[in-house]
Amino acid sequence: MSETGNRLRKLLESPNFDPQNYVKQLSQQSDGDRDLQEHRQKIQNLADETAQNLKKNVYKNYRQFIETAKEISYLESEMYQLSHILTEQKSIMESITQALLSTDKDETSKEMQAAFPKETEELKQRTLTSLLEKVEGGKNIMDTPGRHLVYNGDLVEFDVDNMSPIQKVHAFLMNDCLLIATWLPNRRGTVKYKYNALYDLESFAVVNVKDNPPMKDMFKILMFPDSRIFQAENSKIKKEWLEILDETKKNKVTKDRHKKEEEPPTSPVRAEVSTNPFDEDDDDEPADAEERVNLSLEWIQELPEDLDVCIAQRDFEGAVDLLDKLNEYLKDQPVTQKVKELRSKVDERVRQLTEVLVFELSPDRSLRGGPKATRRAVSQLIRLGQSTKACELFLKNRAAAVQTAIRQLRIEGATLLYIHKLCNIFFTSLLETAKEFEMDFAGNTGCYSAFVVWSKSAMRMFVDAFSKQVFDSKESLSTAAECVKVAKEHCQQLTEIGLDLTFTLQSLLVKDIKAALQSYKDIIIEATKHRNSEEMWRRMNLMTPEALAKLKDEMRSCGMGSFEQYTGDDCWVNLSYTIVAFTKQMMSFLEEGLKLYFPELHMVLLESLREIILVAVQHVDYSLRCEQDPEKKAFIMQNATFLHDTVLPVVERRFEEGVGKPAKQLQDLRKSTRPVRINPESTTSVV
């Protein structure tokens, strides 16, 4: 590199380089465009040299890049294995620790029982009374007979939404309820806490909160639709709270069941019979209906709480299994007041479960995983009797997924490549959705009409993206024909599951295809008219045998088998350039039009061909009438014969092969333009 180039490189590489000031100084110092052009060339040379050096360095270090990538891959694999081993070791250590703690707890409990006599009910109540004296507003809590303290301790309450600490509280767990009291900032004597809330043990569920540093040692209390989160001082105290809460709740359920079983049966009271015939019988149930419905079973007593836990832990299948079990048990039972109360509690949980499942299927959730990712929520909604809602949400979810996939598709420079990717994404998604729909809603045939309607709306979304890339960008007719052909082929794949959307695709594309055919027809007519205006009626001279052979191949591919008779020696063709160019262009239009063809486009394609042919025929007719030179008139007549006897029959035959029926309009056009032998003094050439 020259000294000037080195100086320029150092200037551009300097950390304080300012492009705007540099350009400003350069424009002030230059004498004219020539200086700027030279400087631009220097910068371009510097850029080319830099790119070349970068390419050489890449080639030089290419093997090192590959080896480094391999090493990174090996390291990633080893790290994954190490993580797996550490996880296993952690779980083993936790199980050993838990076993040791359980053993220590049992031994300590036995020692305490041997050292101290069992607390009496009265002692427990006195302990609770002394503690409640420190709670402002908690005097009436001891009014319930038999209530005593089980466990108490300090906790920190956190906000459920943003997980920020709210306040410090003291919790009192009693044998039938849980009292939450807040700390008083200004203590008054022995009063340290203020009454906040009292929860019956049956009204809430306790859920462990997974540690996520710095948020750890937490547990959640669910009182639907509300919930509260508390943090213990350490993991040991948290574990004690969870174990004692669970044990106390079970003890209360067991105690209530035994109490109900020990109640002496009450003798039925004979109902007073009214002699008034106008009195209505308000109670149709037998007197002993309440006794015949046994709701004291343990699983029924714990059912509302178990449903809350299943919903909180996202165990949707378990929740629906419990509901099915309850419905099966109550199917043949009389509807009593207790059954109604149980139903009202369960219905509230069903509503909450439905809301959670609906949220799982909402388009706001992650759309990854394909249609199978929705199967879990859809199947549980169907089991809950919400098949219509499940169908609607499933289809909305898939519509959002398809729309997102189309929107994320990268627009390539080559239109055909983009259309291949677009068709692959859309029709594959549609096929997967149809198969998943058939699997999920196999027993709900009424939902299939909704899927058909959804498929048509999805096809409309696809056609919008398709037309925007193919027709709005003014692609050539051959490219448009290839793109439509690709879309039709992909659409045919849906017939394997009994879904035929070909007609829908054609009806949505017909407007754009009509416009494309008419636009290309106008281009051909304008090009033909332009060539006609410069027509000299001279034979074509292709100069080389190779060019002549190439033209023969092109005309043969167009279907002009008799073109050989119009070729002469020394690379001459006994036709004009205008007629040959017109033939190739019109046959290309016909082939592309047949690729786009479906019945709604029949007249559009037919009229376009007729208009194009008329332009050439009318030009030949006009030239025959106006030409005075006998030799040129004979040459024009030869071109007219080629058009009438060779080109038009090929157009008719190819159209009939592509469409499946003859084109009467083209036949009439050929008959009306039949050339007649020309008398040199006559000016009539075409009948």
Image (cartoon, helix red, strand yellow):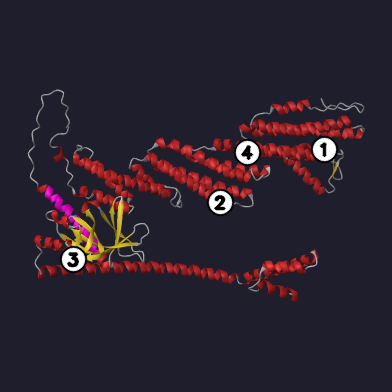
Question: Which residue position holds label 2?
Answer: 409
Which kind of residue does numbered mark 3 sit on? Thr
Mark carried by residue 515: none
Query: Could you tell me which quadrant the N terminus lies in?
Result: bottom right
To which residue does mark 3 refer?
190
Q: Position of residue 639 (x, y in %)?
A: 83, 35
Q: Amino acid at mark 1?
A: Asn
Q: Relative to the observer, which residue lies in front, 597 or 110?
A: 110
Magenta segment includes 483:
no
Residue at which label 1 appears: 532
Instruction: Answer yes or no: is residue 571 visible.
Output: yes
Q: Quadrant of the C terminus?
A: top right
Could you say whether the residue bearing mark 1 is in a helix, strand or loop? helix
Which residue is nearer to you in this view: 534 or 201? 201
Residue depicted at 51% across the width and 38% down the height = 456
What type is the residue that disc 4 sits on? Asp
Q: Could you tell me the amino acid type at mark 2? A: Leu
Q: Magenta segment range?
A: 239-260
Report the mark closest to the observer, 4 or 1: 4
Task: Determine the residue positioned at 76% across, 28% down.
Answer: 670
